[in-house]
Image: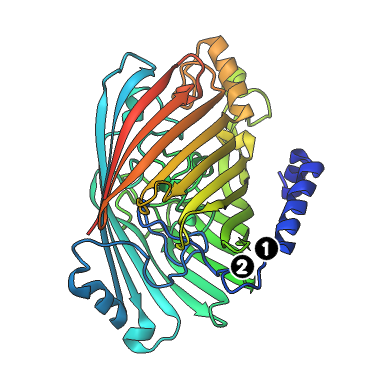
Amino acid sequence: MSLSCLLSRIGKRKSFLVASLFLFLYQNSGMAAPASPYAGLSSPSGPTSFLDTPTSYDNTPFTPNSEHSLLNGKGMLARLADQGIGLGLDYISESGIILNGGRTNVTGSASYTHQIAAQINLSWEKLVGWKGFITHTAFVNRAGHNLSTDAGDRAVTNVQEIYGGGGNVVVHLVYMYGTQDLMNHRMQLAFGYMPVNIDFSTSPLYCTFMNNSICGNPKTETKGATGYSNYPNGVYAARLRVWPLHGLYLQGGVYGVNRGIGQPKYDRTGFDFNTNTYTGVFVPFEIGFIPVFGPHALMGHYKIAAAYDSSPYPYYYEDIHGNPLPLTGQPARTGRGKIQVWVTMDQMIIRHGRGAYDGLYLMAGYVHNTPHNSPYEHQYYLGLSDRGLIPGRRGDVFGVVVNHVTASSALVAAQKLDYQLGKTLPSNALSPQSSATVVEATYNFHVDQGLWVQPDFQYIINPNLERKVKNLSVLGLRLRYIF
């Protein structure tokens, strides 16, 4: 399907409204104000720190603006950074217990999972005089048990976002790439081994939450779409970002599509650099707008994007002759090309303090995937994230979000036929799938320098996108310590 056909399907009226909103914001943003940034804000309590990205939300091209506990004693990290060496080490655990619901009686089932992450950033301008060139490398150790599988849920709504790629191995390489700043930081080229979502369709506000639906990026972009490689899995890639105006950026990239991601035979640890399992390229293009409104500098981030994956994907409903696959038993039709579109935003609506992140943010987004070869067709989310809600508790973060995910119409049509014929259904389903809704509320307590404790509650309607599965209630706890 071409992009023009997809936009026609979405509707010319909706496209016009989106474009009108974008132009209105552009004309009323005060973009010339000095407070309007090239980047944005960085959440020091988020589970991951993304560098050199306008959605990383802090103008920190060398090292993230995070709190540290032990390693910053006597200014050690600052002295290393002055010499061109940026270091980071943190620990995150996410534990949960099922209060009720699930495919079987799993009330009381509990699990623990963790990530230990290390980052090494080298400024070659400070080390050897290579102006504007920085290299970034990150490793993680992940281990634990996925609580969602106990409830029969293998969809994108995992209750522990830290579980997944790179799990249960001692060391997993996340990325290893370089960035070259050009034109006085108005242009940046990145190249090397890196995931898509350190730059595209991401926000540290997403990881306010413990559920995997949006942490890092909306997960309907990655589940069943190998081209959209997400943290902690990298691929060979290059990305170019340009700031034509202060507060407005354009970025595009070319990323390898690696079918071997997450597979023990290939690159479970991230250190297999062979391209034998590459099947195509993933090409995203994103327009981002970062306005600052009014005397209180209410910052927002608005993004509209499309991406094309050239790899071959099997169709869910059609066989090689175009007939219903469940009825014929013939091999599935395979076609190259998968299109994704996303529109996301966050906007500070109330400010609590001087920090870029100190205030109440409204966040919303929409993702669309090509339905005939994607397991998920739509995702919508709407939420609030607030730092410093309670006076005197500036480091605390409160969040509430509602995520709605729908299964692909082609997948559902095939499942309905399989169900009638008594066949095994794809996507680990026992009945035809439809949609799922996740309601989550969380509060992240800033306990001490570099230490956060975060209780979390999740209510999942239709786990695994199945109406016949009992709604799931989960109580969670996230702990983060930055060394």
Q: What percent of the width, then of the height, locates residue 52?
A: 46, 67
The mark found on residue 247 in the picture is: 2
In which image quadrant can residue 334 be found? Answer: top right
Q: Nearer the viewer, residue 337 or 449?
A: 449
Mark 2 and mark 1 lie on one chain; the one further toward the N terminus is 1
- Between disc 2 and disc 1, the foreground one is 1
Q: Report whether 215 appears left or right of 12.
A: left
Q: In the image as oriented, which residue stretches furthest toward the bottom?
A: 129
Kind of residue at badge 1 = Ser
Q: In which quarter of the image is the C terminus?
A: bottom left
Q: Where is 288 relative to 242, above or below?
A: above
What element does badge 1 sit on?
loop
Question: How far apart, in angstroms, are the residues tagged by discs 2 and 1?
Answer: 9 Å
Q: How many marks?
A: 2
Which quarter of the figure has residue 246?
bottom right
Is the residue marked by circle 1 packed among few (<14), some (14-19), or many (20+) residues within 10 Å? Answer: many
User: How are the residues colored?
Assistant: rainbow
Name the kind of residue labelled 2 in the image. Gly
Residues at badges 2 and 1 in contact (C-beta under 8 Å)?
yes
> In the rendered image, is residue 110 in sight?
yes
The residue to which callout 1 is attached is 29
Q: Which residue occupies the foreground of this view, 450 or 106? A: 450
Look at the picture and state if 174 lies above or below 4: below
